[in-house]
Amino acid sequence: MPYKHGAYGDLLPTQDALPPEGVATLPVYFGRLPVHQLMEYEDKVNKPILLQSFADAVSKVGYSDNNWADFDLCEAIYAHFKNSIQAIGPIVVINVLDPEEMRGEESESASVTLVNGQGYINSDKVILNTVAIAGKVLGTDFTAEYTPDGEKVLIRDLTGAMVSPVTVTHYKVDPDLVAYTDIVGGSTPEGVKSGISTVDLVYRTHNIIPTILDAPGWSHIPAVDAALKAAAQKINGHWYAWVNSNLAADENVETIAEAKTWKTTNGYTGAGEAPCWPMAKKGDRKFHLSTLTTATMQMVDYNNDNVPYETPSNKQIDITGVILEDGTELFYDQEQANDLNSKGIRTAMYWGGRWVLWGPHTGAYEYGADMDSRDKFDSNVRMLYYILNTFQSRYGIDVDKPMNRARIDTVLNDFQEWMDNFISDGRLLYARIEFNETSNPVSDIVEGDFDFDIATTTTPPGKSLNAKLQYTTQGINILFGGEQA
């Protein structure tokens, strides 16, 4: 630090995301990222990476502002940290695109014209640490770095001795080599995890419970959706997470009727997921509704003291229309959006001068069908997950301690007080925790197994508000000087 004498001021970068200690909802995204933009990416493949802001994302995993078709998780980075409503984080991203394995078989060359000692390779797939110039040393004679939009590589001559044009060799990453099976992933006999199974690494790596899973560019594939739902239950043997998924929005699913049929046929009917349809746009950008739902859920939770008792439905999202995958714009009103909702499909629509998410239900919902009441609304299920996750997190420290009556009463009183606060705030309607003899036979207790029974009524959303207006002739008396009855 230089010697200072006086009064100084430093202008710092914008804090473009909410601090991680202030947010309890943690989304985990699976897909492809342009980590080839970094010089070092060995620890960026099939590893949970915590991102707290846009600048943090660019430095850790790279960013493409335009090519979300190849680098789909850049959509999530934009939706959380560059939307025009409110930046919200942190998020965890798990990238399956490995530049070491998923690249062209042979190196390529580009002729770069230098102007004032710098020029460009016009490609967003150049693996940065493979850039080479014959007889020159990277970092000493020249530098290579991606432009902020991630579209091309800037070459700078550090010596002033290069003759233009200069031939630059490099390898290119090939995102098309990623298959849905890479997203699904798995675990080797040695315990090496990949794809969705790496969600098990989130808690032990970052000490934060993963609460929402999303694979925006891939969840329209039924096998990926099934893997997300399977992984979301009992993560690390404990944690429950919600899944935001997408239905296909291609040439096979172009209408509301087709979306409703496709949803059921392909098994997007989980009580712990919200299937979304169609896609959305903002200018030339295309978004999966699952991404917008995930970002909105995190923001709504944050505004509610991190308690997920409110649905993201009817909350503003940063879009200008709804589209199919090929960009075809769709036009429908609330009545048609409600038709999707009646089948447990979340959508988006224009209402009240803004674009909003529309649909508070789970994938298990179908209007008129017999179903468990707890599974009707996303906020109901997420609140139950929250209670279970909190109990496990709070009392894990008591495992293996002597379980005498005083400790049992401490758990009962402490957790009841915690839930009572939600009742007084209207976040729960009823909650009771008990230690019952019928749930704890002697055979269990001598094994050290203790069960606490929790009963709760979650606060349902006001899905419809209806005014019943009736005409009456009683006001006619006013015309004859009488009083209104």
Image (cartoon, grey):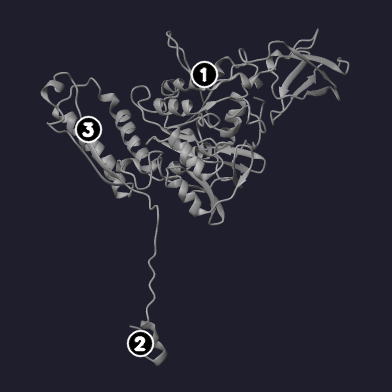
Residue identifier under label 1: 46
Left or right for 321, reference 473: right
Q: Tell me which amino acid carries mark 3.
A: Val
Look at 61% across and 42% down and name the residue there: 281
Is residue 15 visible to the viewer in this orientation of the structure?
no
Q: Quadrant of the C terminus?
A: bottom left
Compute the Cα span from label 3 to label 1.
38 Å
Quarter location, residue 59: top right
Instruction: Inspect the image, locate mark 1, and give the three-letter code of the amino acid beneath it.
Output: Asn
Q: Residue at x 71, y 22 (%)?
A: 145
* Kind of residue sitting beneath label 2: Glu
- The answer for how far apart the CA atoms under marks 2 and 1 are is 77 Å
Say above or below: 138 vs 272: above
Furthest residue to the bottom?
480
| Camera-side mark, 2 or 3 | 2
Q: Which residue is mark 3?
A: 411
Q: Is residue 184 visible?
A: yes
Using the rendered view, name the quadrant where residue 287 is placed: top right
* Residue 412 lies in quadrant: top left
Residues tagged 2 and 1 counted as in contact (Cβ below 8 A): no
The first of marks 3 and 1 along the sequence is: 1
Determine which residue is flagged by label 2: 483
In the displayed structure, 186 sits above or below 77; it is above
Give whichever of discs 2 and 3 has the lower sequence position: 3
Secondary element under disc 1, as helix, strand or loop, is loop
Q: Secondary structure at mark 2?
A: loop
> 451 or 288, which lies in front?
288
Q: Mark 2: few, some, or many residues within 10 Å (few <14, many ≥20)? A: few
Q: Is residue 415 above or below residue 102?
A: below
Residues at badges 2 and 3 in contact (C-beta under 8 Å)? no
Instruction: Please state the horizontal and vertical placement of residue 311, each as a whole percent of the image.
Output: 42, 45
Image location of residue 386, percent across then percent down: 35, 36
